[in-house]
């Protein structure tokens, strides 16, 4: 059973930074694509970023390109989402997810992910 645990959320002023972490257990971490999604009340989960199992491929949603950076530490079974120049519209619950079979890159469809973390709240004040 794969378990994902997010951490690092919080309250930050616009223009600030946060680093989210997602620790994985119960899987051969390096084989799995890892993705981040976010969700606000009343809206569907939105793709943010993904990194391939090897770490060689990354993909980002257009609104976060140049501000967010996704990386993975295989030794620690952890992926990191570095978020800079945060905006109020980045406010959401952020989820990490993983899976092995995707129809396209970047893997933006939440339905194609097999396992999800519990989420961590990010709030950006103006």
Image (spheres, helix red, strand yellow):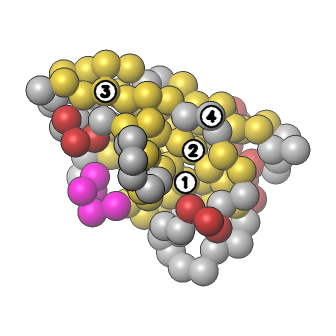
The residue located at (76%, 38%) in the rendering is 3
Lower sequence index among marks 1 and 4: 1
On the rendered structure, is 75 left or right of 6?
right
**Gap in angstroms between the C-alphas marked 4 and 3:** 16 Å
**Gap in angstroms between the C-alphas marked 2 and 4:** 8 Å
Q: Are marks 1 and 2 in contact (CB under 8 Å)?
A: yes
Q: Are marks 1 and 3 in contact (CB under 8 Å)?
A: no
**Gap in angstroms between the C-alphas marked 1 and 2:** 6 Å
Q: Main secondary structure of the magenta part?
A: helix
Residue underneath mark 3: 123
Residue underneath mark 1: 35
The residue located at (46%, 54%) in the rendering is 45
The residue located at (54%, 25%) in the rendering is 7
**Gap in angstroms between the C-alphas marked 1 and 4:** 14 Å
What secondary structure is found at the residue carrying circle 3?
strand
Residue underneath mark 4: 118
Quadrant location of the N terminus in the rendered image: top right
Residue 111 in the image, given as x and y percentages of width and height: 62, 65
Q: Are marks 2 and 4 in contact (CB under 8 Å)?
A: no
Give the magenta-colored segment's residue range: 61-65
Q: Are marks 4 and 3 in contact (CB under 8 Å)?
A: no
Q: Residues within 10 Å of mark 3 (few under 14, many from 20)?
A: many
Vertical placement of residue 48 versus 82, above or below: below
The residue located at (44%, 36%) in the rendering is 93
Q: Label for residue 96?
A: 2
Relative depth, front residue between 99 and 126:
126
Residue 8 in the image, given as x and y percentages of width and height: 47, 23
**Gap in angstroms between the C-alphas marked 2 and 3:** 17 Å
């Amino acid at each position: 059973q794969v378990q994902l645990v997010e951490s690092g959320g919080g309250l930050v002023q616009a223009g600030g930074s946060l680093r989210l972490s997602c620790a994985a257990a119960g899987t051969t971490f390096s084989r799995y694509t890892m993705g981040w999604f976010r969700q606000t009340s009343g809206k569907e989960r939105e793709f943010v970023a993904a990194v391939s199992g090897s770490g060689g491929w990354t993909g980002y949603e257009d609104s976060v390109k140049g501000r967010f950076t996704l990386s993975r530490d295989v030794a620690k079974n952890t992926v990191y989402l570095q978020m800079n120049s945060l905006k109020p519209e980045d406010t959401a619950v952020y989820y990490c997810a993983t899976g092995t079979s995707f129809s396209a890159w970047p893997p933006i469809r939440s339905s194609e992910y097999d396992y999800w973390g519990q989420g961590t709240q990010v709030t950006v004040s103006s």
